[in-house]
Structures are given as C-alpha cells and as structure tokens.
Amino acid sequence: MSRRLPQPDRRPTVVAGASSGIGSATAVALAARGFPVALGARRTTECEQVVDQIRYAGGTAVAHALDVTDAESVAAFAAKVTADLGDVEAVVSSAARLVPGRVHEVDTAEFAGEIDVNVLGVHRLVRAFVPAMVERRRGDVLLVSSDVVDTVRPFMSSYATGKWAVEGLARSLRLELEGTGVRVSVVRPGPTMTGMGMDWSTADTAMVLDGWSRFGLTRNGHFMKPGAVADVIAYVLDLPRGTTIPLVEVNPEPDLTPTEETP
C-alpha cells in the first residue's frame, strides 16, 4: 500500500518577487493552470495590476506587501495569505536584487544587502511556510536561481555568490525534507528580459555588456521572455506526486544555423 499522500486539486501558491519579470509571469502562468496565487513584493501597486489581470482571466489571486529582508514582513504576509487562500501548498522564491560592480570596489554593505535579499530572504520564506508543509506531509518549494551558478559573469559578484548559496541551500533542504512529502526544486534561467538592470547607469550597463562580450559570455545574444521561464516553473509545480525535478536550466534558443542554398 502506498504511503504517499494525494495532492489536492486546489494548491494555493505564494510567489515572492511578483511585481515584475519572472515573478509576475509565474503568477499569471500558475493562475491560468488553476492555482490560487498570492503575489508578494514591496511594489504592491504593480502586484495589484497583475492580480487584476489574473482575475479578469478568471483566476484567483491576491496581493500583499512583502519585504523578504524583514522577518516581520514575511510573517505578516504569510498570515494574510493563509487567511485569504487557506494553507499554502507551494512557495516560489523569485525576489532578487542585482547591482553591478567590481568585487574590490563594491561597498561591503551593498554586497551584504544583495545577499540579504537573494539568500537570507529565501531562508525567511522557508522558515515561514515549510514547517506547516512538513506537518501536512506535502508541499513544494521552488527557488529561482540563475545560470551564473554554472557560468559566472564578471561585475555581478554578489549576485553570483548569492545564487550559488541559494542552490546550496536547496540541496541541503532537499535532503533534510526527504520523506516528508515536501519537494524542493530549482529553476535556473539563462538570459531573460526582466526589469533587472533597467535602473543601471549607462556606464554600468556598458561595463557589464562589454565584459560579457570580452569573455565570450554573450553567446547568441538572445534573451528569453519571462513567460518562457514561468511556464517551466508551472510545469515543475504541476507534476503529480511521486515525481520531482530537482534542477532544470532554461536557456534561449539560438538562431538557426545558415545552410548552403541548393543549386
């Protein structure tokens, strides 16, 4: 007889960092598949706009303020979401911060600030939601990483450090939760057209892109749309019980290679 508990049809899901980019696209993709979603970010106006879009399409969504660097904010968010949607079945951690700079020039406080969002913020979410999942013997934790873990790029050292740490956290958490019914997955996107970097100065943008080109890191130069990554996230969360994907990397497809014309 199987000891695996069934997965409920209704799976309330939290998306942290849902005001733009991969986070907002993930909320839309999950809602389209029937997941009730709770959007969390500091920019609540943008989250509310996504909620309106989801509800207009017939989905279920709520939004509340969430600052993953503040434990009290995370706790308050968790309480509101549970009151709105019921027990949270899945958490998607997509909140991230990236400020470009050279390792030896970046202010230590700025470096630490990125780590606070990109790593400690993940831990705060885990602390807020996973204990109840373990008690119910089911749930999903999905952490959005980056291909900088596999291909480190210059001028984004704290971001790369943070994503390495996130994947280390995921591996430890996956082992510790084995047998509890709580799955842990990582989605590792390659270059994606999000709002990240849009507030950089012209000089910083040129420094980063020139550096990537110099070290051969631009490859085909294509960027994915956030929705492409969101569809992968939704697929991972929608897997039936008894199946899990620990890690999946998503990258843009290059252009077709030219072929010789037939005479």
Image: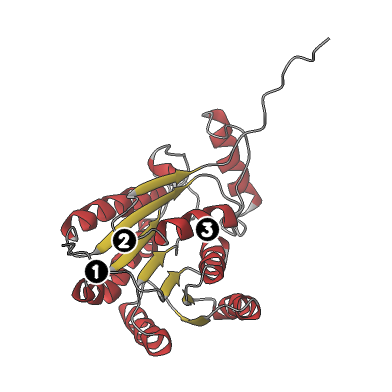
SS state under label 3: helix
Mark number, residue 230? 3
Indicate the amino acid at tag 1. Answer: Leu
Q: Name the residue under label 2.
A: 241
**Quarter of the figure that contains the N terminus:** bottom left
Indicate the amino acid at tag 3. Answer: Ala
Identify whether 103 is placed above or below 142. Answer: above
Mark number, residue 5? 1
Which of the pair 182/1 is nearer the observer? 1
CA distance for labels 1 and 2: 8 Å
Tags 1 and 3 touching, CB below 8 Å: no
Q: At 44% across and 70% down in the image, what residue appears?
A: 16
CA distance for labels 1 and 3: 27 Å
Residue 5 drawn at (x, y percent): 24, 69
Q: In this view of the protein, can residue 110 be seen by the observer?
A: no
Indicate the amino acid at tag 2. Answer: Arg
Determine crowd level at label 1: few under 14, some 14-19, many 20+ residues with C-alpha closer than 10 A.
few
Earlier along the polypeptide chain: callout 1 or callout 3?
1
Tags 2 and 3 touching, CB below 8 Å: no
Q: At 17% across and 64% down in the image, what residue appears?
A: 3
Q: Which corner quadrant of the image does residue 76 belong to?
A: bottom left
Residue 110 drawn at (x, y percent): 41, 59
Which of the pair 48/6 is nearer the observer? 6
